[in-house]
Image: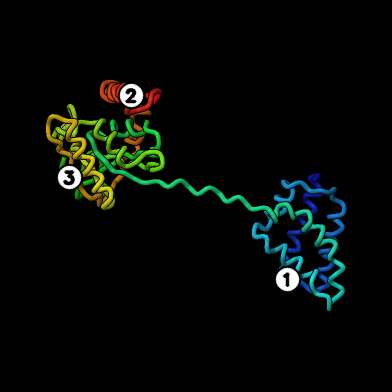
């Protein structure tokens, strides 16, 4: 269909719809349909499905075309309305391939779930889980304390009760909550109380914050399984998530944005390499 013909047809359909077609008088409706019918006769047949879809997009709820046919086709007691029938048939004939086809439904958005965990500095945990297939996003923040919307500086004093944590959104069809926790145990030392390496303080404690009963049960079962892998007792807290507060923007995506920073070079990069060697992080995810 040429652009000029396309524009004509669209303009005429818009005019009919714009006048609330069912409320038109017979004479108004016939004049509109007459113009539309003459325009349709100038358009080469057949109209491609793409062109038909373009027309249909003016009214995605197809009933408009059914109402149009009803208006001009099924009133034998008013013969004047039959004068527009050829135009209506021409229009609906062009649209038939689309109207009769099943409109493919849009794919449902993938279901996601969240997990909130802390295993020392959130820069490290964020860098690890950003490299795990199925993890959609990772946000560094604070949880487990008593102060609302704390700053990083305030959390570092140890007076808020918060731990540095990450909240990750993941696709459970790709990675399960159990697998998230399995990686969590591998990515930090859960046997050191309020410390990870040289980072010390309650904000660096090992913690799992569950959002519902199923996560609580899964976390406790996972901790019991993980305990067999460590010589010392696991000190990881398992507590309900009451609130999660994202950290300041400069903490987000920290490792990826600051790979040359000293802490990243000497702490995070070696940890990532170790986890890649162990198969926790896929190859090529440095």
Number of callouts in the render? 3
| Whether residue 45 can be seen here | yes
Image quarter where the N terminus lies is: top right
- Given this view, does label 3 or label 2 mark the residue nearer the observer? 2
Label 2 belongs to which residue?
276
Between the C-alphas of marks 3 and 2, the distance is 33 Å
Q: Is residue 261 visible?
A: no
Q: Is residue 280 left or right of residue 163?
A: right
- The residue carrying pointer 2 sits among few (fewer than 14), some (14 to 19) or many (20 or more) residues within 10 Å by Cα, namely some
Q: Between residue 153 and residue 195, name the one nearer to us.
A: 195
Instruction: Name the front one of labels 1 and 2.
Output: 2
Mark 3 to mark 1 CA distance (whole Å): 67 Å
Q: Judging from the image, what secondary structure is the residue with disc 2 in?
A: helix
Question: According to the image, label 1 marks what residue?
Answer: 22
Answer yes or no: do the residues labelled 3 and 1 have beta carbons within 8 Å? no
Look at mark 3 in the image and give the residue it sits on: 161
Q: Secondary structure at mark 1?
A: helix
Residue drawn 22% across the image and 39% down it: 153
Q: Residue at x 27, y 38 (%)?
A: 181
Extreme residue toward the bottom, this view = 77
């Amino acid at each position: 269909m040429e652009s000029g013909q396309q524009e004509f047809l669209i303009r005429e359909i818009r005019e009919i719809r714009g006048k609330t077609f069912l409320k038109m008088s017979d004479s108004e409706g016939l004049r509109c349909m007459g113009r539309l019918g003459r325009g349709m006769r100038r358009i080469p047949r057949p109209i491609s499905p793409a062109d038909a879809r373009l027309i249909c997009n003016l009214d995605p709820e197809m009933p408009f075309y059914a109402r149009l046919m009803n208006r001009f086709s099924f009133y034998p007691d008013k013969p004047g309305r039959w004068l527009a029938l050829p135009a209506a048939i021409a229009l609906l004939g062009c649209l038939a391939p689309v109207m009769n086809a099943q409109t493919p439904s849009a794919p449902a958005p993938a279901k996601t779930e969240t997990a909130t965990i802390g295993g020392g500095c959130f820069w490290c945990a964020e860098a690890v889980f950003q490299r795990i297939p199925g993890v959609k996003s990772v946000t560094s923040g604070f949880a487990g304390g008593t102060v609302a919307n704390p700053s990083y500086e305030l959390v570092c004093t140890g007076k808020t009760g918060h731990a540095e944590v990450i909240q990750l959104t993941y696709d459970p069809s790709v990675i399960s909550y159990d697998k998230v926790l399995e990686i969590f145990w591998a990515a930090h030392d859960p046997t050191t109380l309020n410390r990870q390496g040289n980072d010390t303080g309650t904000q660096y404690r090992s913690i799992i914050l569950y959002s519902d009963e199923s996560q609580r049960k899964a976390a406790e079962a996972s901790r019991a399984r993980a305990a067999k892998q460590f010589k010392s007792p696991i000190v990881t807290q398992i507590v309900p998530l009451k609130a999660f507060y994202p950290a300041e923007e400069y903490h987000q995506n920290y490792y990826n944005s600051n790979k040359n920073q000293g802490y990243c070079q000497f702490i995070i990069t070696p940890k990532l390499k170790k986890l890649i060697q162990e198969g926790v992080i896929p190859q090529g995810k440095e």
